[in-house]
Image (cartoon, rainbow, N blue to C red):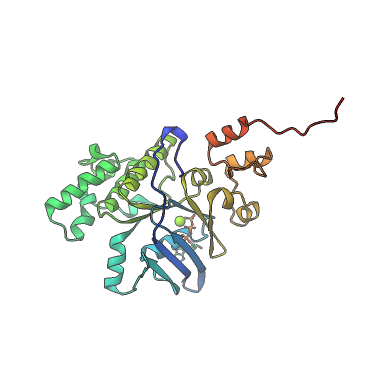
Amino acid sequence: MNEVTEGGVSTPRPAPGGPGLRARGLSFRYGGVWVLRGADLDVPTGCRTAILGANGSGKTTLLRCLSGSLTPAEGSLTLGDVPVRYHRAGLREHRRRVQLVVQDPDDQLFSADVRRDVSFGPLNQGLSDTQARERVEEALGLLAIAELGDVPVHRLSYGQRKRVAIAGVVAMRPRLLLLDEPTSALDPAGVLEMLTALERLEERSTTVVIATHDVDLALRWADQVAVVVDGCVVAGDPGVVLGDRDLIARARLRLPWVLDVADRLGLLTGSGGGPPRDVESLVRRLSRPVDVPAGPAR
Ligand SMILES: Nc1ncnc2c1ncn2[C@@H]1O[C@H](COP(=O)(O)OP(=O)(O)OP(=O)(O)O)[C@@H](O)[C@H]1O
Ligand SMILES: [Mg+2]
């Protein structure tokens, strides 16, 4: 099972499984311009999924289709084997279980202070003031921002605003959380804190999907990566998909540095154990004794 190990974060998780979210043949266009053309994606329950792709490839559009905030022109979406119905009640039901956190927190935060902002979702779901307060404290704790509860939103740093935006969605207790670039513009410690917060959510049985440009993060964090290219999705094992030089070039990405180094050192072929996913596994691979072919006897 995958663990985040760089920076000392390491929590074993249960094996992913069970029918989660399934998209089949999703097509979507803005006006006359098709962005998705038959995209398939499976996100089993508990499966960390990282969506990658060039600027403008359609990552956000895909996330919005998965969340039900955009209706695809073609294709189907099922959650736990139940088809999503594109009418008011069906979408309300879907959005109760699947929540999207948009890339820019300023598109999501609009209340005067943090507690009021985070309570908006639970109150909107019809919970009482007391229940909503409990949800707010729980969400602030999970995101490790309890001390920010009374701070006016406009005084928060960008990284703090990102966490508050996630807390606002977490307070609605979704089963599946879609995060659009949750680590972008965060400093290295902020990225680790974000990943630690996501682990706490996973311990509460939340399945996490992120869109990111960070191929190194995707390799070491995800159970599967999904590359959006030419309107379709190529999904699979992170070490295999992100090591596919042709696909990576087509998708305007780059190889994760661990895979690039391993490839240049000839460690990706025939060495067994699968491609390295992080610094530790690369170092372990490098410290293995090398099989030197026997030379001619003297
Ligand atoms: N509301 C909109 N109206 C018209 N076109 C849009 C709209 N939103 C996105 N697009 C177009 O759809 C395409 C895909 O955009 P999308 O935001 O999904 O890409 P992305 O992969 O998330 O990009 P980025 O990495 O920059 O966030 C782009 O060409 C974009 O210009
Ligand atoms: Mg985007």
Q: Quadrant of the N terminus?
A: top left
Q: Residue 94, image x and y in percent?
A: 31, 65
Q: Residue 79, image x and y in percent?
A: 36, 65
- Is 107 in front, or is 223? 223
Residue occupying the point 42% across, 32% down: 8
Q: Quadrant of the C terminus?
A: top right
Residue occupying the point 71% across, 34% down: 291
Going by the image, does 171 lie left or right of 24? left
Image-quadrant location for residue 70:
bottom left
Going by the image, does 38 lie left or right of 272? left
Residue occupying the point 62% across, 56% down: 247
Residue 253 in view, yes or no:
no
State whether residue 29 is above or below residue 275.
below
Going by the image, does 297 lie left or right of 108? right
Residue occupying the point 36% across, 41% down: 159
Q: Residue furthest right?
A: 298
State whether residue 160 is above or below residue 18.
above
Q: Residue furthest top?
A: 298
State whether residue 55 is above or below residue 76.
above
Q: Residue 19, image x and y in percent?
A: 39, 61
Image-quadrant location for residue 9:
top left
Q: Residue furthest front?
A: 297
Residue 119 in view, yes or no:
yes
Q: Residue 231, image x and y in percent?
A: 54, 65
Tell me the quadrant of ligand 2: bottom left
